Every structure is written in structure tokens, then in C-alpha cells.
Image (cartoon, grey):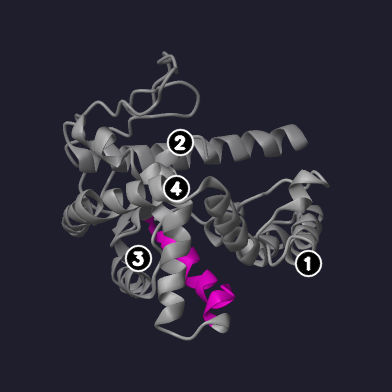
Amino acid sequence: MAIAWLTLSRMCLAASPLLFSAGVLFSAGAFAQSGQPVDDDVEPNVVPNVERTNESSDGAQRFGPNMTAVAEYRDPLIGLNRAVFAFNDVSYRYVLVPAARTYLNVTPEPVKQGIGNFFYNLRTPIYALNHLLQGRPEQTVKDLGRFVVNTTVGIAGIFDPADSWLDMERQVTSAGDTMAQYGVGYGAYLVLPFIGSSNLRNAGGMLLEMPLNPIQYMVDDPEATVVRVFDNFQLYAPLIQSYLDITDESEDPYIFMRNLHIQGIQRDAAYAEQERSEAN
């Protein structure tokens, strides 16, 4: 995604936060489209190098194509979300940010690259399945081809000859993207422990993908959970470091991060609609 912090919603994936999200899914589903408008009079300041347009929708300001401040966005889970956000804020500041800096500073670049390649290769069958369900069989074939080449020639995925030799580029997707493809709305904004900004659709997608992760079949719990956490940590460590700079300059960090997430959903949905229109 173009905006780095949209990826925060997928970091530090572990069993306990996802079980928490499952409970929220059942308890909050009825409120996905309800709730009172919240005070959102905070400049989002999250769309760099984009001219503000003259179009308006329901009083919401626009920041370039398909980007809005969502001034009247309904946040039915705001009480729960703010509590989890406060917990995450402490965790990021005193645990994840220092850990990310240490990992990036002490780990040699070739080692970091190999670790990232290995974990991406393990996730490739999940991407392949989602691409198939999204009606993209050609990409599914490429995904599976990447997996075979990198698992064998690339030595369990540590190296990426599929990309460097065969120009088979990576294509990341998720169950949340698949549900969006079929018109499933994101429901409501949701902050998950450690994971961060998400929504009911993406949280449900995480739960659906859990049984598909090969790590749990390769390693027994609790070690499997530790490996999954490290997988997401190493993937997003370069992005975690910017958290303090982003939130410390915000008038209301919670509203800022929420607006950033919702704007990203709107932008991606608009781009997908544009691609479908051009294809037709």
C-alpha cells in the first residue's frame, strides 16, 4: 500500500490478539453501521504531496483523488478502541520501537533479507489461494510457480531466484482483500491488541487465514506463536520506527491513526473500482 502505516494492522500476529478480535467480531457486528458521530475536528495531515480538491461529500473535506477526512465517520467501538490504543501506545513506545531499532541495527542486511524471503515464501500459498478466490487464476499460477522455485532452488525460500532470475514479482493479498472483492464492507474501525489499526472485515480475514499458515503445522505451540510473532515483527520493523514521529506530532493520535486507516480503505476501494471500470 502507498501509505506505510496501513500495514501496521498486520504486525505482531499472534493467537491471543486474534482470539480477542473474534470476540469483538461477534459482539460488535450489530453496531458496524451504527453509533454516534465523533468529534473529528482534527486535521488528518496524512496525505503528503496531494492537492486538496474542490469536491465535497456530506461536508467532508477531500485531499486529492478518493481521500477524505471523514468528518462524520461513525465509530461505534470508540470506547473499546481508545482503551486498546492506549495499551498499544505503551507497547510500541517501550517495547516494539526499541526492539525494532535493535533488530535493524545489529542484524546484517543479507541475514534480514534471507529471513524476510523465508517467511514470505511460507505465506505464498495463502496469497495464491486468495488470488484464486479473487478470480485471478493467472496470478495464482505465478504464486505457485514462485513457491516451487524458491522452495527448491532458493533453499527453502531463503533466496528469491523467482524474482531475480525469472522476473516473477511478489503480489501480496489477504482474505480481507478477497472479501472486499465480493462487496463485503469493512464494517467498523477496530483497534486490536499489538496489531493496531484494523476493521471487522480484516480481523475476520486474519481468523480465516490462521489455519492456512504452515508455521503451526511445522512447529508446535507455543513455539509456533512465537515464530508467527517474529514473522510479522521482522516484516514491519522498518515501519514501526516512524510511529513515535507520526503520533507525537498529532493533536489526537487515535483520531489521526483512525483517519489514516479509513482513508486508505476508501482510496484502495476507489482504485479497485477504477481498475474494474477500465477493464470493462
Cα distance, mark 4 to mark 3?
Answer: 23 Å
Q: Earlier in the sequence, mark 3 or mark 1?
A: 3
Q: Is residue 115 visible?
A: yes
Cα distance, mark 4 to mark 2?
Answer: 8 Å
Q: Earlier in the sequence, mark 2 or mark 1?
A: 2
- Foreground pick, 230 / 71: 230
Q: Residues within 10 Å of mark 3 (few under 14, many from 20)?
A: few
On the image, the x and y values in percent for residue 276 come to: 69, 39
Q: Secondary structure at mark 3?
A: helix
Q: Earlier in the sequence, mark 3 or mark 2?
A: 2
Q: Amino acid at mark 1?
A: Thr
Judged by depth in the image, the label closer to the viewer, 3 or 2, is: 2
The residue under label 1 is 152
Q: Earlier in the sequence, mark 4 or mark 3?
A: 4
The residue under label 3 is 29
On the image, the x and y values in percent for residue 157 come to: 68, 62
**124 left or right of 215?**
right
Cα distance, mark 2 to mark 1?
Answer: 34 Å
| Marks 3,2: beta carbons within 8 A | no
Q: Amino acid at mark 2?
A: Ile
Q: Secondary structure at mark 1?
A: helix
Residue span colored magenta? 199-216
Q: Quadrant of the C terminus?
A: top right
The residue under label 4 is 7
Give me the residue at 27% from left, 46% from top: 74
Give me the residue at 34% from left, 73% from top: 26
Judged by depth in the image, the label closer to the viewer, 2 or 1, is: 1
Quarter of image, res 278: top right
Examine the rendered structure and indicate whether residue 92 appears above or below residue 277: below
Q: Is residue 78 visible?
A: no
| Marks 4,2: beta carbons within 8 A | no
**75 left or right of 145?**
left
